[in-house]
Image: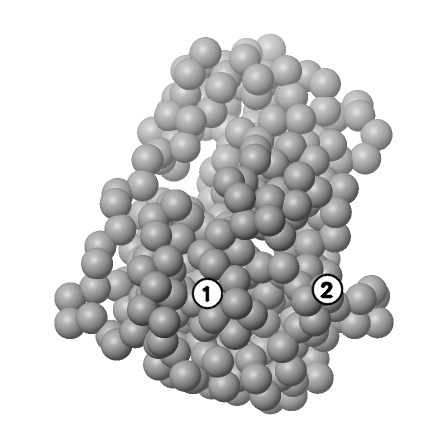
């Protein structure tokens, strides 16, 4: 059993790692503990916010929104590297994920592919939201990447964990793409280097750059299968992770409400995609809401993902 750090130890660990920390209001007692247990804890989860502007981002992560009450994480990592603490305890950040991934994090072994939503992640992970639009184009400043490295290392150091106890939301829950714009493999390498020093490492004069991320790939045949079968399915099953990429693009186009961007090709996604097809010049039966090669490629070219068949 690994109980969570006390709020005081958590704050001290972050500051000892050399981070600038802002305590936002009643963060120590702001949580969702009335909805379920907080702990045992097993790792640190990294997210991106899909927001612009630090003040607005912090407010959303603290207070939540109509469909998801806050806090939405424990800390917000701003573009300038400042960590804003908005809650402590159970937070609405991880959601349901893959129990095989949780076992791998506990054992600190290689992560398997996430393909289930059976396990409560809000109970078991510290969560940090990073201010970024998550579109693959919004830059990740070196100081922000270094703060992510320091935050994860601080918590791992306090618990005696290795870098393998750090994961991205996309490695936990099918259909998620965050954090988008750097790889968790390269971030874990940075965290490992910092932990290897045996003490909080000094800030490097020239931060090490992360490799350029590869563009996501959407499989047209799998996407079409989801579009044809998912709307009639009970609940919101995630049958293909590429749906989330397309839904994010439709949200950015203003064709799909954010609350329906859940990785499930539902009854709201079909008319939204049909609207995109009409923007591409298709009419009548050709704009049926089922993705085709041409319309999907155009969407990918605009929103930075590739298409394969």
Between 167 and 233, the residue placed more toward the observer is: 167
Residue 4, percent across and down?
A: 66, 73
Residue 287, percent across and down?
A: 56, 17
> Which mark lies nearer to you, 2 or 1?
2
Q: Is residue 58 visible?
A: no
Q: Residue at x 61, y 26 (%)?
A: 240
**Which residue has dot 1 on it?**
152
- Which is nearer the N-term, disc 2 or disc 1? 2
277 up-or-down from 263: above or below: above
In three-dimensional space, the C-alpha distance between marks 2 and 1, rounded to whole angstroms, equals 20 Å
114 up-or-down from 164: above or below: above
Residue 278, percent across and down?
A: 50, 24
Residue 191, percent across and down?
A: 38, 60
Between 294 and 144, the residue placed more toward the observer is: 144
Horizontal placement of 120 versus 190: left or right?
right
208 up-or-down from 18: above or below: above
Q: Residue at x 37, y 25 (%)?
A: 306
* Label 1 crowd (10 A; few <14 / some 14-19 / many >=20): many
Mark 2, secondary structure of its residue: loop
The picture quadrant where one finds residue 222 is top right
Q: Which mark is residue 1?
A: 2
**The C terminus, quarter of image:** top left
Colour convention: one colour
């Amino acid at each position: 059993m690994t109980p969570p750090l006390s709020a005081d130890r958590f704050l001290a660990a972050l500051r000892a790692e050399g981070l600038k920390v802002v305590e936002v209001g009643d963060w120590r007692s702001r949580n969702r503990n009335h909805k379920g247990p907080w702990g045992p804890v097993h790792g640190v989860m990294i997210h991106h916010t899909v927001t612009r502007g630090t003040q607005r981002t912090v407010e959303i992560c603290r207070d939540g929104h109509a469909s998801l009450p806050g806090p939405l994480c424990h800390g917000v990592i701003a573009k300038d590297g400042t960590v804003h603490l908005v809650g402590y305890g159970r937070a609405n950040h991880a959601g349901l994920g893959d129990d095989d991934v949780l076992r791998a994090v506990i054992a600190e072994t290689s992560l398997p592919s996430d393909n289930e939503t059976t396990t409560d992640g809000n109970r078991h992970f510290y969560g940090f939201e990073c201010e970024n639009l998550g579109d693959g184009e919004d830059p990740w400043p070196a100081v922000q990447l270094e703060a992510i490295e320091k935050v994860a290392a601080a918590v791992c150091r306090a618990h005696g964990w290795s870098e393998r106890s750090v994961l991205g939301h996309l490695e936990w829950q099918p259909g998620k793409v965050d954090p988008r714009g750097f790889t968790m493999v390269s971030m874990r390498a940075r965290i490992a280097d910092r932990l290897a020093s045996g003490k909080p490492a000094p800030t490097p004069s020239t931060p090490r750059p992360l490799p350029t991320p590869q563009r996501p790939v959407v499989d047209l045949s799998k996407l079409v299968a989801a579009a044809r079968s998912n709307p009639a399915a009970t609940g919101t099953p995630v049958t293909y992770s590429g749906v989330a990429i397309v839904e994010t693009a439709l949200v950015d186009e203003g064709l799909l409400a954010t609350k329906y961007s859940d990785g499930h090709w539902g009854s709201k996604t079909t008319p939204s995609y049909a609207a995109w097809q009409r923007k591409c010049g298709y009419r009548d039966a050709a704009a049926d809401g089922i993705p085709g090669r041409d319309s999907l490629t155009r969407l990918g070219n605009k929103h930075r993902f590739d298409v394969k068949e």
